Amino acid sequence: MSVRFSHLDPGTPESDWQEALRARTLVDLEDDVDFLVVVAAHPDDETLGAAGLMARASSRGTPVVVVVASDGEGSHPMSPTHTPEQLSSLRRRETEEAVSRVAPGSDIRFLGLPDGELHEHTARLRAQLVAVVDGAPAASADRVIVAAPWSGDGHRDHRIVAEVVASVCAPRGLLHVAYPIWAWHWGGADDVPWVRARVLRLRDEERERKRRAIACHTTQIEALSSQQGDEVLLHAGMRSHFERDVEVFLGEREEPAVSDGLDAAWFDAFYDRNGDDPWGFETRWYEERKRAILLASLPESRLGAVLEVGCATGILTAELARRSERVVAMDAAEAAAAKARERLRGDPRVTVLRAAAPDDWPIGEFDTVVLSEVGYYLSGPDLRRLLHHIAGSLSERGCVVACHWRHPVAEYPLSGDDVHDALNEMIGWQTLVSHRERDFVLEVFAPLTAVSVAEREGLV
């Protein structure tokens, strides 16, 4: 799940969460274990989410290992006073001090993976976790707890860590529990799967140790300086969620089987049943209007080298070609590719391929990538592979335009909103255009260095 939020938002009041907690009878977490592993995506996750659990384990003499995936060096990307390297060093020291307050003598392992790019380093993260759990003191599987950020927290790095932890714990039968961090900020009571919730009721001494541990993370709870870009990340309202007398953990359920994407045979059969214009691209005002909105949303009049993923019969391809140096258009269905070739015959700028994304990826760099009404045909893993192909093929001046139907279709593995959630999680991209209607969503993405149309033309 992807959620748009800002640390600058006031967020959900803690009083709302206290009311939600009082309204439910929650099961206690079984905390009498032989081995505790706490995994964090960034320094301070472990303290905010599980400091009380670490304190409980430590007081019983239970070995505690803390694995911190990244150094959190991206916490202040616009800081005028601190480099990422300086932040990395500071945040490691803060974590060491914080953990020493709740679980002195714990084994802390900093992996140093890039902040915001954990999706590129899952193999190393998994290998480190395997080494930790397989090297645990002799204990039965039901006497081990692995705590990690919640997969539904709304932060991509947290989701990636949760998925990797699940892949390690599930085959070993280890208890994997999740601690929310940002969900307390952006969410409400209906966003929490309470049926899977377990609580650790903190003793006064544990609560005080946790408060002192949180205070160690000064780069997050205090401004780095008075200058813009050095603002407080965890304001008092956010911190209040972690000053409770309980810690909430969610049992991470096993992921449902991933739906397979629709293959080329499905599309060939669809064209065979419904003719050569099955979606009404040539006859419906809805389609004509949507194409006009898409074309008007592109930030440059000249599009350079264009890749169109899922060109269908080539109507949009022809419009793109008029503004392009060259176009590579691809579609999984032979009937669609043949119709597109016929429509665009004689235009030397256009190459039409019968090719299925993400497997049949064309070679080259592109300035404009069009992903229109195609992403929801893919499985989740294939969509992620497709987006990484796009990111690797996009030029420095490039943009990605995506447009998708929002209504549910039983045969499609994903929804249009699922596709755009995944696009909005892509690190290193900014959203230039966001157009959302009841029927479709259209967005344009570009590298963080891209400027607006008005800025490019000297209007601002």
Image: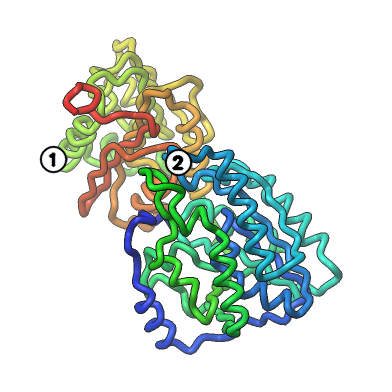
For the residues marked 2 and 1, what is the alpha-carbon distance in whole angstroms? 45 Å
Within-10-Å neighbours for mark 2: few <14, some 14–19, many 20+: few
Left or right, 56 with respect to 309, comes to right
Left or right, 68 with respect to 244, comes to right
Amino acid type shown at disc 1? Trp
> Which residue position is annotated with label 1?
285
Question: Above or below — where is 394 with respect to 129?
Answer: above
Query: SS class of the residue under badge 1?
Result: helix
Question: Above or below — where is 159 with respect to 199?
Answer: above
Residue at image point 57% right, 61% down: 216
Residue 10 shows up from this direction: yes
Amino acid type shown at disc 2? Pro
Within-10-Å neighbours for mark 1: few <14, some 14–19, many 20+: few
The residue closer to the viewer here, 439 or 282, is 439
The residue closer to the viewer here, 414 or 48, is 48
User: Could you say where residue 19 lies in the image, as x and y percent from the top left?
Assistant: 37, 83
Q: What label sits on residue 326 in the rendered view? A: none
Question: Above or below — where is 58 with respect to 373?
Answer: below
Residue that sits furthest to the left in the current view: 285
Q: Nearer the viewer, mark 2 or mark 1?
A: 2
Residue 336 shows up from this direction: no
Q: Quadrant of the C terminus?
A: top left
What's the colour scheme?
rainbow
User: Could you say where residue 323 lies in the image, as x and y percent from the top left?
Assistant: 25, 18
Residue at image point 81% right, 64% down: 136
Query: SS class of the residue under badge 2?
Result: loop
The first of marks 2 and 1 along the sequence is 2
User: Could you say where residue 155 lies in the image, as x and y percent from the top left?
Assistant: 47, 55
Q: What label sits on residue 77 in the rendered view? A: 2
Residue at image point 47% right, 59% down: 221
